[in-house]
Amino acid sequence: MTLNVGERVRLAMDLRLAGSVTPAGELPEEAGVFAASVALAAGIEGTVERVDEHHRQQSQEVREYLRLKSLLEDFGHQMPPASRKQLEEQVEALEEPWVAYQRQMLRVTVRVRLDNGFVLDDAPEEAFTPA
């Protein structure tokens, strides 16, 4: 699911936001540290203001898998059987990191202005459903 700017959404889960708070107008290094906690209940609606796609970096294993897989597909039929088998084994050994990378290849975060006035920025897309 990809959310779009301007789309109405509903918070899909209860959230508890906790951390330090800096009073408006003060620089973070000069301000006193206040602890704060805010709870937001599932079902609160809002509007998507921004959608950011974050592409994950490829690990060395993923790059090697892509290189070897390409080599196997392009030249495997011309290779001696023993070399082809060795290459197939190398590709197979790197399939697990490749599958894991594909599952997490794209991470989408959103900025949502909730109807109660709160703004959630860099929130995972999965935290919301279309309203």
Image: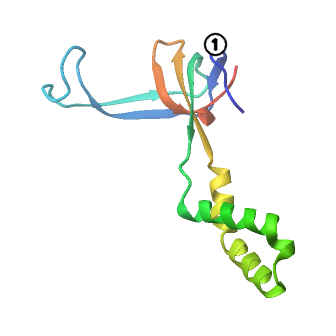
Q: Quadrant of the image for the C terminus?
A: top right
Of residues 78 and 26, which is closer to you in this image? 78
Q: Coloring scheme of the render?
A: rainbow
Instruction: Estimate the x, y position of residue 16 in percent, counting from the top left.
Output: 44, 34
Q: Which residue corresponds to the image point at 72% horizontal and 73% vertical from the top-left?
A: 92
Q: Tell me: residue 54, above or below residue 121.
A: below
Instruction: Estimate the x, y position of residue 51 in percent, counting from the top left.
Output: 58, 25
Q: Secondary structure at mark 1?
A: loop
Residue that lies at the very extreme toward the front in this rendered image? 78
Q: How many marks?
A: 1
**Residue 96 relative to residue 28: left or right:** right
The quarter holding residue 21 reads top left
Q: Which residue corresponds to the image point at 18% horizontal and 22% vertical from the top-left?
A: 27
Q: Tell me: residue 124, above or below residue 116.
A: below
Instruction: Estimate the x, y position of residue 91 in percent, counting from the top left.
Output: 71, 71
- The amino acid type of the residue labelled 1 equals Gly
Of residues 41 and 101, which is closer to you in this image? 101
Circle 1 packing at 10 Å, graded few (<14), some (14-19), many (20+), is few
Q: Tell me: residue 51, above or below residue 78.
A: above
Q: Quadrant of the image for the N terminus?
A: top right
Instruction: Estimate the x, y position of residue 53 in percent, counting from the top left.
Output: 58, 33
The quarter holding residue 52 reads top right
Q: Which residue corresponds to the image point at 58% horizontal and 16% vertical from the top-left?
A: 46
Of residues 94 and 66, which is closer to you in this image? 66
Q: Which residue corresponds to the image point at 63% horizontal and 23% vertical from the top-left?
A: 10
**Residue 57 relative to residue 77: left or right:** left
- Which residue is under mark 1? 6
Residue that lies at the very extreme toward the right in this rendered image? 77
